[in-house]
Structure formats: structure tokens, C-alpha cells
Image (cartoon, helix red, strand yellow):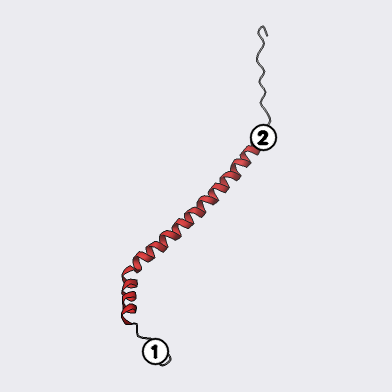
């Protein structure tokens, strides 16, 4: 075989080429679906962490608020 020549594919090579050609759309779909799933999990994790941070900030703000004290009114006053 000379440099630059392609080896003969033979029967197995031809079958693999046909399989790849017929399934390339399905394979591309699986890759796209997996990518979207991973991105969704990442986005959900970021939102969860940000939600925890927001809840902690809210709890700190509430803890620092001046308490509102209301005493019961006395009868006769």
C-alpha cells in the first residue's frame, strides 16, 4: 500500500460505514440530549446554591431587624 492510499474496507468496513451512515442522526440526538441533560443539571445546581445563598442572606437580614415590641394594653388605661 502506498502512502495516502486508503486500505480496503472489506465487508466489515462496508457494514460499519453503512451502520454509521444510517445511525448518525440517532447518535447526534443522543449527544445533544446528553449535553442538554448535563447543562440542565449544572443550571439546577447553580440555582440551588444561589437559592441557599439568598435564603441565608434573608435569614441574616431578618435576624438584624429591630424587633417590634407590642405590649398588651392594660385595662383601665
Q: Percent x, y for residue 61? A: 65, 37
76 versus 57 height, above or below: above
Q: Residues within 10 Å of mark 1 (few under 14, many from 20)?
A: few
Q: CA distance from mark 1 to mark 2?
A: 76 Å
* Pointer 1 with pointer 2, Cβ within 8 A: no
Q: Residue at x 55, y 51 (%)?
A: 46
Quadrant where the C terminus sits is top right
The quarter in which the N terminus is drawn is bottom left
Q: Residue furthest bottom?
A: 2
In percent of width and height, residue 15 lies at: 31, 75
Mark 1, secondary structure of its residue? loop
Res 25 quadrant in image = bottom left
Residue occupied by mark 1: 5
Identify which residue, 10 or 60, lies in the foreground: 10
Q: How many marks?
A: 2
Residue under the point 47% across and 54% down: 40
Residue 65, image quadrant: top right
User: Residue 66, how many percent across, how many down?
Assistant: 68, 30
Left-right relation of 77 to 12: right
Residue for point 39% across, 89% down: 5
Q: Secondary structure at mark 2?
A: helix
Q: Which residue is mark 2?
A: 63
Q: Is residue 32 left or right of residue 66?
A: left
Q: Is residue 72 above or below residue 51?
A: above
Amino acid at each position: 500500500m502506498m502512502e495516502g492510499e486508503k486500505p480496503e474496507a472489506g465487508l466489515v468496513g462496508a457494514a460499519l460505514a453503512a451502520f454509521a451512515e444510517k445511525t448518525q442522526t440517532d447518535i447526534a440526538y443522543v449527544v445533544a440530549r446528553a449535553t442538554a441533560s448535563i447543562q440542565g443539571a449544572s443550571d439546577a445546581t447553580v440555582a440551588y446554591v444561589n437559592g441557599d445563598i439568598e435564603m441565608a442572606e434573608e435569614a441574616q437580614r431578618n435576624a438584624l431587624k429591630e424587633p417590634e415590641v407590642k405590649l398588651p394594653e392594660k385595662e383601665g388605661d
